[in-house]
Image (cartoon, rainbow, N blue to C red):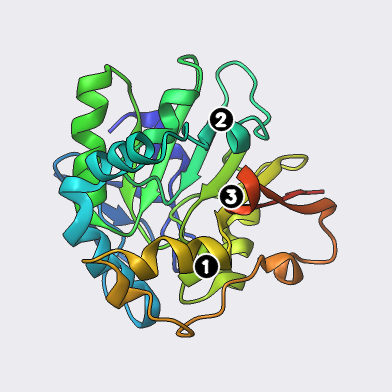
């Protein structure tokens, strides 16, 4: 692991620095060990609540996820919606960029090559697919298995922080938002995107293989603008992509 990457990491529970310990990472104060698997540090231990439910789901569907998305756009004759919310990001050359819930890495293809990209996901299956995609696309990224509510990074580590898809069903959405704020540098614009209630109803609840994880009325989907701390600036929320997604943005003071 590069020294630059290591300098941004910390224990997600204690915030103490980490150091190399053979093929693992070790908390410099408590000695707690975090293993590294196939080059990806693992910060996920016990997962509970909705996080466990959706970790299991995405581990299961990861191998065919990209194909299913391409098939959907081919059948519906609709282009990818990614460019619409990716245009919200404020990027500068050589920026440290964090995507929370990186999935298979599809958003990275919309980003410039001169950034340092960090991707976090709770699903090992999605990270494994992302790793294979990076080789195919000849892109570099630093990947980590972690919960959005427990990000393994120091305060103010990133110039750009965004999340696209998943926060609707996080175990603790407020804590996840606070974690994104914690790791962002002052002045950073944070972008949070997820699907609207209509999209959940029209897509997932009618799709064999995944609809059991999205039963009607099981979880109420809404934009979490009310969870943004009052001290944040330039808070804005709107629907995009014809109402399929909401886009929440705000700036860390």
Q: Are marks 2 and 1 in contact (CB under 8 Å)?
A: no
Q: Nearer the viewer, residue 181 or 32?
A: 181
> As drawn, is 198 to the left or to the right of 103?
right
- Name the image quarter holding residue 222: bottom right
Q: Nearer the viewer, residue 37 or 241?
A: 241
- Name the image quarter holding residue 49: bottom left
Q: Residue at x 50, y 40 (%)?
A: 98
CA separation, marks 2 and 1? 21 Å
The secondary element bearing badge 3 is classed as: helix
Mark 2 vs 1, N-terminal side: 2
Disc 3 crowd, CA 10 A, few/some/many (<14, 14-19, 20+): many
The secondary element bearing badge 1 is classed as: helix
Which residue is disc 2 drawn over?
A: 83
Disc 2 crowd, CA 10 A, few/some/many (<14, 14-19, 20+): few
| Residue 167 in picture, x, y percent from top left | 51, 63
Which residue is disc 3 drawn over?
A: 183
Mark 2 vs 3, N-terminal side: 2
Which residue is disc 1 drawn over?
A: 168
């Amino acid at each position: 692991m590069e020294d630059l990457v290591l300098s941004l990491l910390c224990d997600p529970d204690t915030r103490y620095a980490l150091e190399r310990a053979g093929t693992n990472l070790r908390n410099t104060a408590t000695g707690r060990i975090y293993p590294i698997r196939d080059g990806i540090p693992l910060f996920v231990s016990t997962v509970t609540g909705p996080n466990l439910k959706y970790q299991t789901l995405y581990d299961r569907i990861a191998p065919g996820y990209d194909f299913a998305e391409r098939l959907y756009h081919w059948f519906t004759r609709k282009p990818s919606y990614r460019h619409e919310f990716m245009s919200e990001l404020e990027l500068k050359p050589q920026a440290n960029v964090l995507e929370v819930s990186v999935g298979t890495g599809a958003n990275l293809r919309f980003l410039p090559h001169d950034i340092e990209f960090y991707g976090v996901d709770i699903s090992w299956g999605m990270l494994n697919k992302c790793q294979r995609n990076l080789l195919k696309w000849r892109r570099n990224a630093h990947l980590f298995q972690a919960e959005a509510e427990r990000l393994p990074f120091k305060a103010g580590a990133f110039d750009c922080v965004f999340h696209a898809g998943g926060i609707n069903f996080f175990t603790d959405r407020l804590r996840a938002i606070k974690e994104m704020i914690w790791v962002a540098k002052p002045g950073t614009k944070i972008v949070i995107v997820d699907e609207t209630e209509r999209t959940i109803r029209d897509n997932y609840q009618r799709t064999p293989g995944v609809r059991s994880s999205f039963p009607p009325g099981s979880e109420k989907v809404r934009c979490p603008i009310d969870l943004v701390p009052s001290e944040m600036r330039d808070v804005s929320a709107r629907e995009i992509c014809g109402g399929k997604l909401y886009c929440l943005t705000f700036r860390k003071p």
